[in-house]
Amino acid sequence: MHISKGAILAGAVALVLSGPAMAASCPKHMADIDAALAKSPQLTAQQLNDVKAQRAKGEADHKAGKHGDSMDALGKAKKILGIQ
């Protein structure tokens, strides 16, 4: 199998550009979670604790530059809250 230099370059560019895009979206996801929590959603105590823990982890990961991990944690919180 032969991979062209152009294909490798295109992949590298896509990877580099996806980091800032994910970094910019973390705060939006945190705001979505905060807005949902402000509406006092009907959650069990365990679910509420899980949402808050995942929200905090997402913010910490974002600040540490771990945007993939941040998006995973924030996605878990949003899933519990039932938001997209």
Image (tube, grey):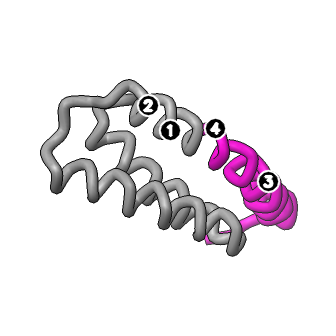
Write the residue at 58% across / 37% down.
31
Which quarter of the figure is the C terminus placed in?
top left
> Residue at the spot x=49%, y=62% of the render?
56
Of helix, strand and loop, which mostly describes the magenta segment? Answer: helix
The residue where tag 4 is placed is: 28
How far, Cα to Cα, is label 3 from label 4? 13 Å
For the record, the magenta segment spans 1-28
Which one is closest to the eye, mark 1 or mark 3?
1
**Amino acid under disc 2:** Ala
The disc placed on residue 20 is 3
Mark 2 to mark 3: distance in Å? 28 Å
Label 1: element kind: helix
Q: Which of marks 4 and 1 is nearer the N terminus?
A: 4
Category of crowding for the residue at label 1, using alpha-carbon neighbours closer than 10 angstroms: few (below 14), some (14–19), many (at least 20): few
User: Circle 4 — which element?
Assistant: helix
Q: Position of residue 24 (x, y in %)?
A: 75, 46
User: In the rendered structure, are the residues bearing label 1 and label 3 in contact, judged by CB atoms less than 8 Å apart?
Assistant: no
In which image quadrant can residue 46 be found?
bottom left
Which amino acid type is marked by label 1? Asp
